[in-house]
Amino acid sequence: MASKTLADLLDPLTKPARLVEKLDKGRVRCFACAHRCTLKPGQRGICKVRFNQDGELRAPWGYVSAYNVDPIEKKPFMHFLPGADALTIGMLGCNFHCDFCQNWFTSQALRDPASEGSGRYIQTVTPKELVANALRNNAEIIASSYNEPLITSEWAMDIFKPGKEAGLRCVYVSDGYATPEVLHALQPYLDGFKIDLKCMSNQHYRELGGTLQVVLDAIKLAHELGMWVEVVTLVIPDFNDSNEELWEMARYLVSISPDIPWHVTAFYPTYKRQDTPATSARILQRAADIGQEAGLHYVYAGNRPGRVGSLEDTHCPSCNTKLVERSGYVIQGYHITAEGACPKCGEKIAGVWTDKPESVHTGGWGFPRSL
């Protein structure tokens, strides 16, 4: 008897998609992401995990490939309940094919033969069980991450709905290749949206599997819909680290809101981009300086803990008081008031803050805990 393929394992773990338009002759158009794949019966979308089965679009449901309790700073979110724990879940598949993906073994499932073994990480689970798990582990947040959450949005919404009813906050860690339809569908459930802005070159975006304008529009719309948005740029030498490109990114974010936190994070050689050197702390400092000069109030540098000075901390944009002190993923000090303001000058600090600052967990473990 032939051994089961990854598709054999994944395809039964699906339900009828809701983010879909039915067309003629059994065709369907998916709008979970901006590829808007039009599929004939038997065809798979660009993500490979959504497919047309006899005229019905099937979407992933009922499993995780990874789930851990992480600090929310690991997502990274710096202005969303600092010090809180997030039950972080992931599935398989992605709508991009970035050659520098850190989670390629799961994200490139069904696309890269080297990912075939990712099926061994599949664990079946229900939304109710995941919410109970979050509550049992004192997590305040459920985060969909590790692979691209947009392509599994039906599953996420079915988890987030009972999660919200139980008092949990819900966030996405996404490449931002979203349609307006999926963002509107997610609006009742999604409190926070971390979006990757990978570059400001449409040519480079096409090499990764998308187009730049879609991501720019998604950042703007998510902000307008009231989601708390933070933007991350993985700064890669000789890819997106020119002063001109960094200025373009920063100015675009300022045009939406100077209060959007911008994370400039360090690249390390991985997957199919092994020959590019790691990003130095000096490059991150230059990127952060550009962000601040462009007018962004909150700029952070990541993946170089202890080597980027105060760029791990949150400061008041009015009086420069240090409000949240960090070392890597660990909160060392928290000084924002219950009203979400600077205790020194009273400036309102943009973000989602606890109304019980005395309860913020400081000096903790700061590393993922497998469940």
Image (spheres, rainbow, N blue to C red):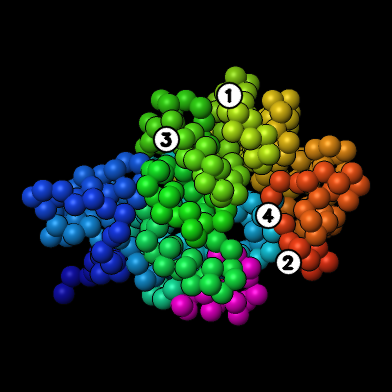
Q: Does residue 325 appear in this view?
A: no
Closer to viewer: mark 4 or mark 3: 4
Residue marked by disc 2: 365
Q: Name the one closer to the observer, 282 or 161.
A: 161
Q: Earlier in the sequence, mark 2 or mark 4?
A: 4
What residue is shown with label 3? 214
Question: Gap between marks 1 and 3, in whole Å?
Answer: 16 Å
Task: Between label 2 and label 4, give the one nearer the viewer.
Answer: 4
Q: How would you rate the neighbour count of disc 4 (Cα within 10 Å): few for under 14, some for 14-19, many for 20 or more?
A: some
Determine whether the residue tagged by mark 2 lies in a helix, strand or loop. Answer: loop
Q: Provide the residue span drawn in magenta.
A: 128-142
Q: CA distance from mark 2 to mark 3?
A: 37 Å
Query: Mark 1 or 4 closer to N-term?
Result: 1
Q: For the view shown, which residue lies furthest in the left direction?
A: 25
The residue identified by callout 1 is 248
Determine the secondary structure under disc 4. Answer: loop
Q: Is residue 86 visible?
A: yes
Tell me if 355 is positioned left or right of 204 in this view. right
Q: Amino acid at mark 2?
A: Trp
Report helix, strand or loop for mark 3: helix
Q: Which residue carries the number 4 mark?
A: 352
Mark 1 vs mark 2, CA separation in Å: 37 Å
In terms of sequence position, does the residue under pointer 1 or pointer 2 come before the other? 1
- Which is more foreground, mark 2 or mark 3? 3
Give the mark nearer the N terminus: 4 vs 3.
Answer: 3
Q: Locate the N terminus by quadrant.
A: bottom left
Identify the residue at horizontal 78%, vertical 66% (top origin).
Answer: 356
Q: Nearer the viewer, mark 1 or mark 2?
A: 1
Q: In 3D space, how far apart are the residues under numbered discs 1 and 4 (Cα atoms)? A: 27 Å
- Kind of residue indicated by mark 3: Val
> Is 133 covered by the magenta stretch?
yes
Residue at point 91%, 47% (across, down): 344
